[in-house]
Image (spheres, rainbow, N blue to C red):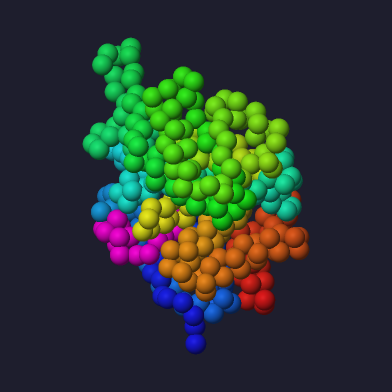
Amino acid sequence: MTDGRSYTLGVLNGDGIGPEIVPASVLIADAAVKAANAQPIQWRRLPLGFEAIEKLNEATPVSTLEALAETDGWILGPHDSAAYPEPFKSQLNPSGTIRKYFDLFANIRPAKAFPGSSPLKPGTDLVIYRENTEGFYADRSTFKGTGEFMPTPDVAIMLGIITRAGCERIARAAFEAAERRRKKLTIVHKANVLKLTTGMFRDVCREVGQDFPDVTVDDYHIDAFTVHLLRRAPEFDVIVTENMFGDILSDLTGELAGSLGLAPSLNASDTRAMAQAAHGSAPDIAGQDKANPIAMILSTAMLFDWLGGKHNDPAITRAGRLIEQGVTDTVAAGVCTTDMGGSATCSEFAAAVANHIAGN
């Protein structure tokens, strides 16, 4: 008899290498669920990106959003919205649309030195909690329209929105993670210049921290913090910051830990989560079975861990850990894609990980 509850998860292949790395992740997820004696996943495949434009004349169909609302979470492949024809190219991109529609306020981006990846900073093991709905990102700082406008052809203005509610919920999520990890949290801001906006972000994070007395808290200005990361990334644990700073820092930490191509991420609210690799769609190698699927696979493992925590389900949590260990063991055995110095194709690597999990 299988353990835990049953889950329905959406599958959105996306563009570029998405139709290669997302099915690879599903294959491995199924193997891990079976090995963990968890309930089989009910996968629901949904159109997005070029596929949706061709079939439904929408990059992010309303029908896809409505279907996702009926799931427990989903896997999102990368999109190549810069290559979409108009009017889709000028619209809010698919991942942004989904994040906004479901209010996925936390973008969780771990950076852990990966064996076999020649990390720039061995020993790095940190996670960035990036506020995902506010800040200076024009696509999510207003209810309608965008946060950028031009009053004259020679003047461009952008809005940066920071709210107490937005700060509080990302801070709480970050402190809860710090309690589970090494009990250390770093707030990154620019309060010496952006005194009202990122100053409030810093102050609200510290206020929330009073509910977590076991967590040690420090804070840095964003410019200084990039230097500290380059010098001593392994000393940091949980980092919480606003939207734009978090986006930039997570690319940096991904490279310090080995490669942005290996960097997983999870977008989450209190009720739903979306697995989405931090990298792009790599159209130059699409369809060639060359892509490294590790970031997408590990993002799926993060989704399982999130589901396990939310639903108090040890079986799905166990499946997520099997995925992570399966990837680590497979690379350690010398099986990896060409970007990591190996010779395996995307599909061969996925099959090797799935077989390893099934054998354990």
| Viewer-proximal residue among 295 and 134 | 134
User: Residue 66: x, y in percent?
Assistant: 27, 59
Q: 47 and 212: which one is in front? A: 212
Q: Quadrant of residue 334?
A: bottom right
Give the answer, above or below, for where 111 lies relative to 348. Answer: above
Asked whether 227 falls inside the magenta stretch, the response is no
Q: Quadrant of the C terminus?
A: bottom right
Q: How far from the left and from the top, in percent, is residue 193?
A: 46, 19
Left/right placement of residue 191 relative to residue 103 reads right
Q: Residue at x 71, y 64 (%)?
A: 329
Residue at 70 percent across and 64 percent down: it is 330
Across the whole image, how many numbered discs are drawn on residues? 0
**Which residue is located at x 46 percent, y 69 percent?**
312
Is 149 drawn above or below residue 290 in the view shown?
above
Q: Does residue 71 show up magenta in the picture?
A: yes
Q: Is residue 353 above or below residue 237?
A: below
Q: Residue at x 44, y 39 (%)?
A: 207
Front residue (pair 337, 29):
29
- Region rendered in magenta: 63-83
- Choose top left, top right, bottom left or bottom right for residue 331: bottom right
- 290 in relation to 244, above or below: below
Task: Where is residue 108? Give x, y as percent.
Answer: 50, 48
